[in-house]
Image: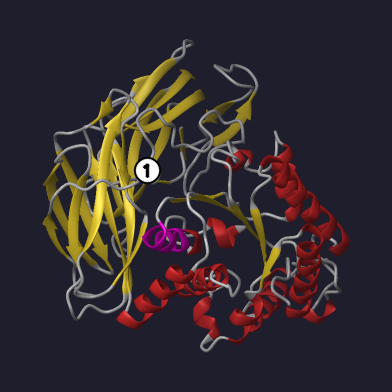
Amino acid sequence: MRMLTLSLIAIALLSFHAALAAAPGDNMLDDPGFEKGPWPQSPAWHGEITVVDEPVLSGEQAGRLAVGEDADATIYSGYVPCSVGLDYRFTVQARGTGTLSLRSIQLRNDPEDKYLIERPENHVELTDEWQEVAIEISPRDPLVTRIAVVVQLDGAGAEAFLDDALLTPKGLPGGELRVGASYMMVTPGVDFDVAISARCDAGPITEGSLNLTLVFGDQVEREEIRITGETTTISLAPPAGADPGEGTISIVNAEVGGGATAWIDVVDAETYAQFEALAQAAKLDSPAHLLFLGDSLTDQQRGHNYTDMVSFWLNRAKSDVSYRNAGVGGDYITRTWQRLQGPGGYRQEMYDDLYEPTPTRVFIWTGPNDSKLKPKPEYKTPDDYPFDPVVPLDQFEETFVTVIEHIRENAPEAQFTVISASSSVHEITRATVVKRIAANGNGGSYFGKPEALEQFNERMQEVAAATGADYLDVYEPTRTADDKPSLFTADGVHISHKGNLLVAGLILGYLGE
């Protein structure tokens, strides 16, 4: 794909969606206090990492790193997404014996040159008192996508206790950037606008600069522009002969400590016109707030999946349409119900403030996980699997009804739409079970068996009838589509970018019926 051209234009006022990067002070680490268990190690590293309940600085556990015969031990924080152009600071509280040091790893999107490693001279001699050990990371290579911190302990018989780690962008308190829309569909040769705002706890940022990185395939372009008020708008135009494809615009401001990303989906004029017509025909009173619940098909590709596509087009046609993607990867309808009751559900935080604002439309897309068939060691071929889904059919239906009734109590005016399970590329999912049995003697869960999906879809139709919800069939369109495999990722279950486009079109079309 040829690159977009970039030029600054006048200020425009648009509604903004949430920033897509952590703000200064936000902890980017999944398990900063070792409450979930030991941090990971590379197979080549030495030493032992465990968790202990004494000494602990906060919480109930701390990490314990002990050297082995080689007199060193190494662990790392795990990789987290980062924004090129921001500065990050990692700190960890440590006590014990030996010398503790930190180094950073920047992961590049280049299989032949994946890592940038920095080893600052920050060796700290540990004592019986807790002390802070710190390192700063400043990714500037445009191919860097993720960062991690390595913790190393040296010294014969050395032992370190670790707690309260923090990885956060540096910047102004509450600093963040926002983009007008995380997803935009455009056509070659036609200008479109991207609106950006910067703010912190003290208010809007109206001066300074923004660093933009445009990435399309293996092409990268960087640009610095001036902030021109509370909202800065840039104009982009794909070249007239640009091939269809998806790219990103990443915007950062190191002083503010904020970053955001927008996905630019270049499509042909015919596709664009089809979506435009569907959006114009949609029957939706505004203001409207759409709530999407689902599993990984809703949770994956955040910022540019079907929920973002639907919102982009409805806002162009209707304006004043907001949405919340509360999808949770790995969800079953029983997990959804547990989380709605809270607290303590799996990824409970995904439902925080679920009814703020109150939804006017609720879409629930589930089924692939509920309908997967449970394995047993004695199953030697996929044909040995009986109909034994993770969530029994009766429980699935009963819980689904309960979920809708519960949400309706909190959003009494909302319209509900039950979305069927999508099809799968059964040749792939079946072959996956065969390979697992051959390699491990156990085929694992069996996803996407058509007979199972169809039985669950029948129950979802009954749920819709019992609750007065609408039923939207995406199974048949995904089952019978031309070039069906292109709608799915390599596992045959999750939907691809093309699959998201199909589902978004189906939802927009349904709203126009």
At a point 53% along the width and 30% down the height, the residue shown is 65
Q: In this view, does 252 lie to the left or right of 436?
A: left
Stretch in magenta: 308-318
Quarter of the image with the C terminus is bottom right
Q: Can residue 213 be seen here?
A: yes
Quadrant of residue 353 within the rendered picture: top right
Q: Judge whether 458 appears above or below 152 on screen.
A: below
Residue 373 relative to residue 142: left or right: right
Q: Tell me residue 441's x, y (percent).
A: 75, 70
Residue 472: image quadrant is: bottom right
Q: Residue furthest top?
A: 129
Instruction: Label 1, secondary structure: give it.
Output: loop
Regarding residue 157, the answer to whether it shows in the image is no
Residue at (52% x, 35% y) in the render: 68
> Is 237 drawn above or below residue 209 in the view shown?
below
Relative to 299, 275 lies left or right: left
Name the residue at 79% across, 61% down: 390
- The x, y position of residue 51, in whole percent, is 61, 30
Verify whether residue 61 appears in magenta: no
Q: Which amino acid does label 1 sit on?
A: Ala
* Magenta highlight on residue 309: yes
Q: Where is residue 221 in the image (x, y as percent from the top left)?
A: 17, 60
Would you name the residue on which mark 1 appears? 19
